[in-house]
Image: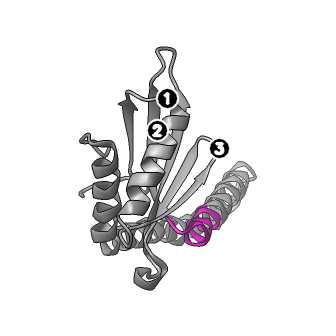
């Protein structure tokens, strides 16, 4: 999977109601023991790599099952890392983004009072940190690509349709 997105996703319409599709997916995926772990919630399914095969960058597939007006189900899937890993990146982006805004505001303030705008120099390492976080996320995504494919094939096999990831 070649994707520059941090969390690849897809949308698929299936000719079943959400409740029956959820039961169908659970039955099919649990029948293929060992390919993935299935956790079902109300209109939501989470597919994970078995614990024995997981590593730090192991992905999971979260499926949202929304009813459509014609009795079908819109399945929205999103691939991502373990929630702890995702939170680490989310907080990293938030912190660096906040620091960038503060450095820019202080730099503009320094310019307005005819001072030396040294705070603008802080933007260089902050932007480098943001680029570094993005690069590490892409690296982790590549390390988990085989398992992402495993989850995707399990989902496609369970619904019997091909799905394009964007």
Boundaries of the magenta span: 81-93
The image shows residue 135, relative to residue 22, as above or below, that is below
Residue 35 in magenta stretch: no
Where's the C terminus, which quadrant? Answer: top left
Which of disc 3 and disc 2 is earlier in sequence?
Answer: 2
> Quick one: SS at disc 2?
helix
Q: How many C-alpha atoms fall within 10 Å of the one at disc 3: few (<14), some, or many (≥20)?
A: few
Tell me: 163 left or right of 22. left
Q: Mark 3 points at which residue?
A: 42
Circle 1 residue: 17
Q: In this view, does 135 lie to the left or right of 157?
A: right
Residue occupying image coordinates x 58% and y 62%: 93
Residue located beneath label 2 in the image: 21
Q: Distance between the residues labelled 1 and 2?
A: 6 Å
Pair 2/3: label in front: 2
Q: Is residue 106 visible?
A: yes
Q: Do the residues labelled 2 and 3 touch (CB within 8 Å)?
A: no
Q: Quadrant of residue 151?
A: bottom left
Marks 1 and 3 in Cβ contact (< 8 Å): no
Q: In this view, does 99 lie above or below 77?
A: below
């Amino acid at each position: 999977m070649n994707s520059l997105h941090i969390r690849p996703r897809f949308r698929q319409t299936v000719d079943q109601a959400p409740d029956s599709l959820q039961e169908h997916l659970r039955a099919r995926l649990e029948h293929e023991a060992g390919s993935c772990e299935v956790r079902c919630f109300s209109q939501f399914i989470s597919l994970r790599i078995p614990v024995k095969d997981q590593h730090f960058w192991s992905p999971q597939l979260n499926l949202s099952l929304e009813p459509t007006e014609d009795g079908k189900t819109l399945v929205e899937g999103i691939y991502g890392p373990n929630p702890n890993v995702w939170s680490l990146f989310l907080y990293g982006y938030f912190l660096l983004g906040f620091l960038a805004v503060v450095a820019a505001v202080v730099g503009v303030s320094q310019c307005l009072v005819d001072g030396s705008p040294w705070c603008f120099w802080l933007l260089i390492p902050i932007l480098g940190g943001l680029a570094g976080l993005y690069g590490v996320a892409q690296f982790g995504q590549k390390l988990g690509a085989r398992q992402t494919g495993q989850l995707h094939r399990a989902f496609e096999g369970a619904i019997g349709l091909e799905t394009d990831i964007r």
